[in-house]
Amino acid sequence: MLLGQKPKPGPGSRLRSASELPVFRYHPDPVATGSIRKNHSLVCPCCGLRTGWIYESEPYGLGDQPPNLCPWCIADGSAARKFGSRFAGDIEGTVPDAVAEEVDQRTPGFTAWQTERWLTHCGDAAAFLGRVGWDRLKDLPDATEAVLDDGCDESTLPLITEDGDLSAYLFRCLHCGVHLAYADAS
């Protein structure tokens, strides 16, 4: 195979298009956030298939956790059942057990500088929208207020960048639509 050429599907392959990706209620666009990425060569250690998509991070759990899980094994919970994999850091706030289980065991997490914090609102987990900088945060007064309430100093707000040493993590309540966020530093 030539460098950069996509591998041809063969036994153990089921390359899928982006339109076939599972829907994650609490992480609506994991490709845009960088949690799921296209990869035509790696095989999912859970289902044994080369689906064309992998989870970018390694999950949490006891013992060695497998890299390169496919989004379908995350979505249906088979990775959690087979490996004891968990995908969320801390879920902040009180939510029903079924919601906590869905976020932790069947929703791709995201990478943060410190432990990920999954925000909640209206008694439910919020939808993770991605990392943002001040350029986006300043247009979302509810999210800016949440960052300030979380302890970020107002003078540091302009220093928040999407991919820098100080980033904000943006969420949206699935019930009332309010934006939530927290800032995290390296």
Image: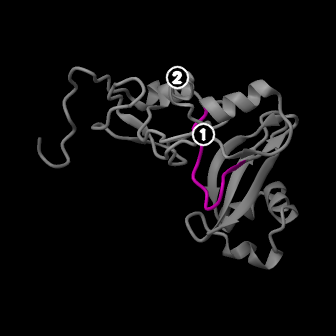
Q: Quadrant of residue 162?
A: bottom right
Could you say whether the residue bearing mark 1 is in a helix, strand or loop?
Answer: loop
Q: Residues within 10 Å of mark 2 (few under 14, many from 20)?
A: some
Instruction: Look at the image and give the residue range highlighted in magenta.
Output: 107-117
Alpha-carbon distance for marks 1 and 2?
A: 13 Å
Question: What's the mark number on residue 78?
Answer: 2
Quadrant where the N terminus sits is top left
Q: Quadrant of residue 49?
A: top left
The amino acid type, in three-letter code, at marker 1 is: Phe
Q: Quadrant of residue 137?
A: bottom right
Residue depicted at 70% across the width and 52% down the height: 170
Could you say whether the residue bearing mark 2 is in a helix, strand or loop?
Answer: helix
Residue 113 part of the magenta segment: yes
> Where residue 131 sits in the image (x, y, percent)?
62, 56
Q: Nearer the viewer, residue 185 or 37?
A: 185
Quadrant where the C terminus sits is bottom right
The amino acid type, in three-letter code, at marker 2 is: Ser
> Where residue 2 sits in the image (x, y, percent)?
11, 45
Q: Nearer the viewer, residue 13 or 5?
A: 13
> Where residue 149 sits in the image (x, y, percent)?
88, 62
Question: What's the mark number on residue 87?
Answer: 1
130 to 19, vertically: above or below: below
Residue depicted at 56% across the width and 26% down the height: 75
Residue 33 part of the magenta segment: no
Q: Residue furthest front?
A: 63
Q: Residues within 10 Å of mark 1 (few under 14, many from 20)?
A: many
Q: Is residue 156 left or right of residue 151?
A: left
Q: Earlier in the sequence, mark 1 or mark 2?
A: 2
Q: Is residue 38 left or right of residue 102?
A: left
Q: Nearer the viewer, residue 102 or 160?
A: 102
Q: Nearer the viewer, residue 76 or 172?
A: 76
Residue depicted at 84% across the width and 67% down the height: 151
